[in-house]
Amino acid sequence: MSAFRVALRRLLGLALGGLVAVSVSPVDAQQRPYSAAEVKAAFLYRFGTYVEWPQPAAASDPIRIAVLGAPNVAMQLATYLPGRSIQGRPVQVRPIERIDDVGDAEVLFIGEDRSSTLTELIAALGKRPTLVVTDAVDGLKHGAMVNFQIVDQRVRFEISLRKAQDAGLMLSSVLLSAAIRVETSSCSRDCHGPLAPPQFALFWPFEPLEA
Protein backbone atom coordinates (compact mmCIF):
# COMPACT_ATOMS: atom_id res chain seq x y z
CA MET A 1 0.00 0.00 0.00
CA SER A 2 1.40 3.44 -0.94
CA ALA A 3 2.37 6.01 1.66
CA PHE A 4 -0.50 8.18 0.42
CA ARG A 5 -3.06 5.42 0.99
CA VAL A 6 -1.69 4.68 4.45
CA ALA A 7 -1.87 8.35 5.45
CA LEU A 8 -5.34 8.65 3.95
CA ARG A 9 -6.61 5.70 5.98
CA ARG A 10 -5.05 7.26 9.08
CA LEU A 11 -6.90 10.52 8.46
CA LEU A 12 -10.24 8.80 7.87
CA GLY A 13 -9.84 6.37 10.74
CA LEU A 14 -8.41 8.64 13.44
CA ALA A 15 -9.89 11.98 12.45
CA LEU A 16 -13.35 10.56 11.93
CA GLY A 17 -13.65 7.54 14.16
CA GLY A 18 -14.34 9.84 17.11
CA LEU A 19 -15.10 13.06 15.24
CA VAL A 20 -11.63 14.35 16.05
CA ALA A 21 -10.72 17.99 15.49
CA VAL A 22 -7.71 17.76 13.18
CA SER A 23 -4.88 20.25 13.17
CA VAL A 24 -4.29 22.07 9.90
CA SER A 25 -0.91 23.42 11.01
CA PRO A 26 2.39 21.52 11.07
CA VAL A 27 3.45 19.79 14.27
CA ASP A 28 7.04 20.57 13.45
CA ALA A 29 8.98 22.13 10.60
CA GLN A 30 9.51 18.80 8.83
CA GLN A 31 5.81 17.95 8.59
CA ARG A 32 3.26 19.16 6.06
CA PRO A 33 -0.14 19.60 7.74
CA TYR A 34 -3.37 18.19 6.48
CA SER A 35 -4.95 20.86 4.36
CA ALA A 36 -8.28 22.32 5.42
CA ALA A 37 -9.84 20.82 2.27
CA GLU A 38 -8.66 17.33 3.23
CA VAL A 39 -10.06 17.59 6.74
CA LYS A 40 -13.39 19.10 5.66
CA ALA A 41 -13.85 16.41 3.03
CA ALA A 42 -13.20 13.74 5.63
CA PHE A 43 -15.72 15.27 8.00
CA LEU A 44 -18.36 15.57 5.26
CA TYR A 45 -18.02 11.86 4.61
CA ARG A 46 -18.37 10.99 8.27
CA PHE A 47 -21.27 13.35 9.05
CA GLY A 48 -23.63 11.04 7.18
CA THR A 49 -23.06 8.35 9.79
CA TYR A 50 -24.75 10.54 12.39
CA VAL A 51 -27.79 11.73 10.41
CA GLU A 52 -31.17 10.05 10.02
CA TRP A 53 -33.10 11.20 6.95
CA PRO A 54 -36.93 11.15 6.99
CA GLN A 55 -37.35 8.90 3.96
CA PRO A 56 -35.88 5.38 4.13
CA ALA A 57 -33.84 4.33 1.13
CA ALA A 58 -32.78 1.04 -0.39
CA ALA A 59 -29.29 -0.20 0.43
CA SER A 60 -28.36 0.13 -3.24
CA ASP A 61 -29.42 3.79 -3.36
CA PRO A 62 -26.28 5.94 -2.95
CA ILE A 63 -25.90 8.77 -0.48
CA ARG A 64 -24.90 11.82 -2.51
CA ILE A 65 -22.71 14.65 -1.24
CA ALA A 66 -23.16 17.74 -3.42
CA VAL A 67 -20.37 20.34 -3.33
CA LEU A 68 -20.86 23.96 -4.45
CA GLY A 69 -18.08 26.52 -4.49
CA ALA A 70 -15.35 24.29 -3.07
CA PRO A 71 -13.53 22.44 -5.89
CA ASN A 72 -10.65 21.37 -3.65
CA VAL A 73 -13.05 19.68 -1.21
CA ALA A 74 -14.87 18.00 -4.09
CA MET A 75 -11.54 16.71 -5.39
CA GLN A 76 -10.63 15.28 -1.98
CA LEU A 77 -14.02 13.56 -1.72
CA ALA A 78 -13.51 12.04 -5.15
CA THR A 79 -10.31 10.53 -3.73
CA TYR A 80 -11.83 9.35 -0.44
CA LEU A 81 -15.16 7.91 -1.48
CA PRO A 82 -14.65 5.10 -4.01
CA GLY A 83 -15.44 1.81 -2.28
CA ARG A 84 -16.75 3.46 0.88
CA SER A 85 -20.27 3.48 2.29
CA ILE A 86 -22.46 5.37 4.76
CA GLN A 87 -25.04 3.42 6.77
CA GLY A 88 -24.57 0.49 4.42
CA ARG A 89 -25.19 2.59 1.30
CA PRO A 90 -22.60 3.55 -1.32
CA VAL A 91 -21.59 7.21 -1.24
CA GLN A 92 -20.86 9.56 -4.13
CA VAL A 93 -19.67 13.14 -4.58
CA ARG A 94 -21.57 15.47 -6.91
CA PRO A 95 -19.73 18.72 -7.79
CA ILE A 96 -22.31 21.31 -8.83
CA GLU A 97 -22.23 24.84 -10.26
CA ARG A 98 -25.78 25.95 -9.42
CA ILE A 99 -27.99 25.42 -6.39
CA ASP A 100 -30.67 24.04 -8.71
CA ASP A 101 -28.37 21.07 -9.39
CA VAL A 102 -28.54 19.80 -5.80
CA GLY A 103 -31.34 17.45 -6.79
CA ASP A 104 -31.87 14.67 -4.27
CA ALA A 105 -28.46 14.94 -2.58
CA GLU A 106 -28.52 14.01 1.10
CA VAL A 107 -25.65 16.35 1.98
CA LEU A 108 -24.77 19.74 0.49
CA PHE A 109 -21.52 21.55 1.21
CA ILE A 110 -21.38 25.23 0.23
CA GLY A 111 -17.80 26.47 0.23
CA GLU A 112 -16.52 29.87 1.24
CA ASP A 113 -16.38 30.92 -2.42
CA ARG A 114 -20.18 31.32 -2.25
CA SER A 115 -20.39 32.99 1.16
CA SER A 116 -21.56 36.30 -0.27
CA THR A 117 -24.83 34.72 -1.48
CA LEU A 118 -25.24 32.14 1.27
CA THR A 119 -28.64 33.33 2.47
CA GLU A 120 -30.14 33.17 -1.02
CA LEU A 121 -28.60 29.80 -1.79
CA ILE A 122 -29.92 28.15 1.37
CA ALA A 123 -33.33 29.78 1.02
CA ALA A 124 -33.60 28.28 -2.48
CA LEU A 125 -33.44 24.79 -0.96
CA GLY A 126 -36.69 25.25 0.94
CA LYS A 127 -37.50 22.45 3.38
CA ARG A 128 -35.86 19.60 1.47
CA PRO A 129 -34.24 16.99 3.76
CA THR A 130 -30.65 17.85 2.86
CA LEU A 131 -27.94 18.33 5.47
CA VAL A 132 -26.58 21.78 4.61
CA VAL A 133 -22.95 22.31 5.62
CA THR A 134 -21.21 25.65 5.11
CA ASP A 135 -17.81 27.24 5.53
CA ALA A 136 -18.53 30.81 6.60
CA VAL A 137 -17.94 33.11 9.55
CA ASP A 138 -21.67 33.18 10.38
CA GLY A 139 -23.03 30.22 8.43
CA LEU A 140 -25.68 29.26 11.00
CA LYS A 141 -27.20 32.74 10.86
CA HIS A 142 -27.65 32.29 7.11
CA GLY A 143 -29.54 29.03 7.56
CA ALA A 144 -26.85 26.32 7.60
CA MET A 145 -27.29 23.21 9.73
CA VAL A 146 -23.55 22.60 10.20
CA ASN A 147 -20.83 25.22 9.77
CA PHE A 148 -17.07 24.72 9.81
CA GLN A 149 -14.87 26.94 11.95
CA ILE A 150 -11.10 27.05 12.41
CA VAL A 151 -10.36 27.14 16.14
CA ASP A 152 -6.71 27.24 17.24
CA GLN A 153 -5.72 26.07 13.74
CA ARG A 154 -8.02 23.06 13.95
CA VAL A 155 -11.13 22.34 11.93
CA ARG A 156 -14.18 22.29 14.21
CA PHE A 157 -17.89 22.71 13.54
CA GLU A 158 -21.03 24.23 14.99
CA ILE A 159 -24.60 22.98 14.57
CA SER A 160 -28.09 24.43 14.28
CA LEU A 161 -30.27 21.63 15.61
CA ARG A 162 -33.33 23.77 14.91
CA LYS A 163 -32.57 24.03 11.18
CA ALA A 164 -31.92 20.30 10.92
CA GLN A 165 -35.18 19.47 12.67
CA ASP A 166 -37.09 21.90 10.45
CA ALA A 167 -35.92 19.85 7.46
CA GLY A 168 -36.94 16.56 9.10
CA LEU A 169 -33.40 15.43 9.90
CA MET A 170 -32.42 13.71 13.15
CA LEU A 171 -28.85 14.27 14.36
CA SER A 172 -27.09 11.82 16.65
CA SER A 173 -26.13 12.90 20.14
CA VAL A 174 -22.57 11.91 19.21
CA LEU A 175 -22.52 14.58 16.51
CA LEU A 176 -24.06 17.17 18.81
CA SER A 177 -21.53 16.37 21.54
CA ALA A 178 -18.67 16.98 19.13
CA ALA A 179 -19.85 20.47 18.11
CA ILE A 180 -18.27 23.55 19.65
CA ARG A 181 -21.65 25.29 19.57
CA VAL A 182 -25.24 24.05 19.24
CA GLU A 183 -28.21 26.23 18.40
CA THR A 184 -31.29 24.48 19.77
CA SER A 185 -34.98 24.65 18.91
CA SER A 186 -35.82 26.22 22.28
CA CYS A 187 -33.77 29.37 21.64
CA SER A 188 -34.91 32.51 19.92
CA ARG A 189 -31.28 33.58 19.53
CA ASP A 190 -28.04 31.63 19.23
CA CYS A 191 -27.52 29.11 22.01
CA HIS A 192 -24.02 28.22 23.03
CA GLY A 193 -23.54 24.64 24.09
CA PRO A 194 -20.54 23.36 26.07
CA LEU A 195 -17.32 22.44 24.40
CA ALA A 196 -17.21 18.85 23.25
CA PRO A 197 -16.23 16.37 25.94
CA PRO A 198 -12.72 14.92 25.61
CA GLN A 199 -13.81 11.61 24.09
CA PHE A 200 -15.30 13.44 21.09
CA ALA A 201 -12.84 16.32 20.68
CA LEU A 202 -9.36 14.90 20.73
CA PHE A 203 -6.39 16.75 19.31
CA TRP A 204 -3.77 14.61 17.62
CA PRO A 205 -0.34 15.42 16.15
CA PHE A 206 -1.12 13.72 12.84
CA GLU A 207 1.48 12.84 10.28
CA PRO A 208 0.96 14.70 6.98
CA LEU A 209 -0.40 13.18 3.81
CA GLU A 210 2.33 12.44 1.31
CA ALA A 211 2.09 13.10 -2.39
Image (spheres, grey):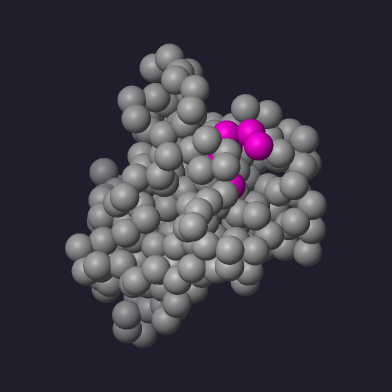
Task: Check the image and name the residue furthest to the bottom.
Answer: 29
Quarter location, residue 60: top left
**Front position in the image: 6 or 22:** 22
> Which residue sits furthest left?
199
Magenta-drawn stretch contains 131 = yes
Residue 205 pos. (x, y %): 27, 73
Q: Which residue is at 38% across, 78% downward?
A: 26
The N terminus, quarter of image: top left
Question: Is the residue 185 above or below the residue 126 in the image?
Answer: below
Q: Does residue 203 belong to the magenta stretch?
A: no
Residue closest to the eye, 145 or 79? 145
For the point 30% across and 51% down, which residue is it? 174
The image quadrant where one finds the C terminus is bottom left
- Looking at the picture, does residue 9 appear above or below residue 203? above
Residue 101 in the figure: left or right of residue 110: right
Residue at (47, 48) in percent of width and height: 44
Q: Residue at x 64, y 34 (%)?
A: 128
Q: Is residue 78 visible?
A: no
Magenta residues span: 127-133
Q: Hey, which quadrant is residue 137 in on the image?
A: bottom right
